[in-house]
Image (spheres, grey):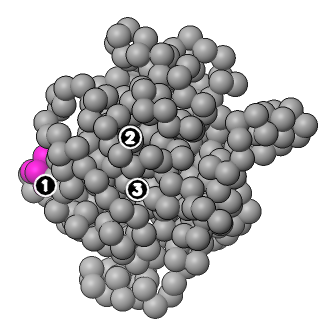
Amino acid sequence: MKRLRIIHVLHRMGAGGTELALRRVVAGLDPERFENIICTVAPFAPLTEDVPTVGARFVSLQRSGRKTGSLVADLARLFRRERPDIVHSRNWGAIEAVVAAKLAGVPRIIHSEHGRDIHTMNGDPWRRRAFRRFCYALADQVFAVSRELGEHYAAQVGLPASRLGLLPNGVDTGKFRPDAEARLRMRQQMGVGSDEIVAGTVGRLDPVKDHATLLSVAEQLAAQTRLRFVIVGGGPEHERLSTRIAASPSLRKRVHLAGETTRPEDWLNAFDIFVLPSLSEGMSNTVLEAMAAALPCVVTSVGANPDLVDDGDSGFLVEARDSGAMADRVLKLATDPQLRSTFGKRGRLKVETQFSLARMLENYARLYTISPVQQRDERAALGARGHEWR
């Protein structure tokens, strides 16, 4: 049987959630049914030198800088040379692949939205909205990773929300799970006592993640001597966060910047509480991973977070930038071990039943193998909420 050749186009392969989800997809799809090619606009970064391990061939347009110029001609040449069955572009940085695929006569064109840029969180410029609508019309299928994100982009381009499908992320619940050995090892490494409570977060140090609010939470809870905070990740905000921590005696004693990691599952096991103060999210892989590790979560009510964390049941939702509310919820969990255990178990169960990696891979396989007409017929038969891919 001939394998389906899929070219996945995105701006870069880095450490973000979009890239992580793509790695999981191409590593998990049956190699006897699918051939995956990953095309990036930007050159490969040193961080991603190990990307061939995910089971895909890689090509790059080698465009650097924020202004890359038109990509359509280069992408169309690539598509004519490679003759893919499907082109799947992700986010604004790769949306020109839709036009290029149409010009190159690619049989199936898919575009997906995985998040928002901090500079356009509240709305895109009109030219971007017009071009996005044009590309949505050209694509055979368009989907978002969360309902809120799909509604946002549909409103931006003036289309009904039903025009965008929904295909959530998934997490490997075998890799991300409670691990007593990892917990002991990581906490010993940090010098954390068995009676101390660790509230932590994992993710890129980017302004959209709003780690500054987490530092404000730490300052407000400075009197709670048993409470420690850990921030895992690297990125452009590292120096700013380091400077603020160094300038504050209370933060120096209780906040640890751990840097980047290749084993987030170990760090999650070192935590007692997971905190995510983001200003914007698509569908957070890190929240899913924290829930899979049976951690109670305190997260902002943005993006798909309310679809993942059930407020008062598996964690708490607070408004973005509300450090007071976040501090209150963190303290509530820090002082109630039974509540932490209950919330953590409920979160783990939700991930196992609704957001597993196996379920995500099944949905992607169906996306790539079942025609848009067949999918529309299925949705009509099952009802609007009858299947995750819709």
Quote the CA–CA distance across marks 1 and 3. Answer: 39 Å
Task: For marks 3 and 2, give the one nearer the viewer.
Answer: 2
Frontmost residue, 51 versus 199: 51
The alpha-carbon separation of the residues under discs 3 and 2 comes to 14 Å
Q: Is residue 350 left or right of residue 54?
A: right
How many marks can you see? 3
Give the Cα distance between marks 2 and 1.
48 Å
Disc 2 target residue: 80
* Vertical comparison of 99 with 299: above or below: above
Left or right: 373, with 297 as reference point: right
Relative to the observer, which residue lies in front, 63 or 308? 63
Q: Dot 3 corresponds to which residue?
A: 37
Magenta residues (range): 239-243
Name the front one of labels 2 and 1.
2
Q: Residues within 10 Å of mark 3 (few under 14, many from 20)?
A: many
Amino acid of disc 1:
Ser
Q: Secondary structure at mark 1?
A: helix
Which residue position is annotated with label 1? Answer: 242
Could you tell whether 74 is left or right of 117 in the image?
A: left
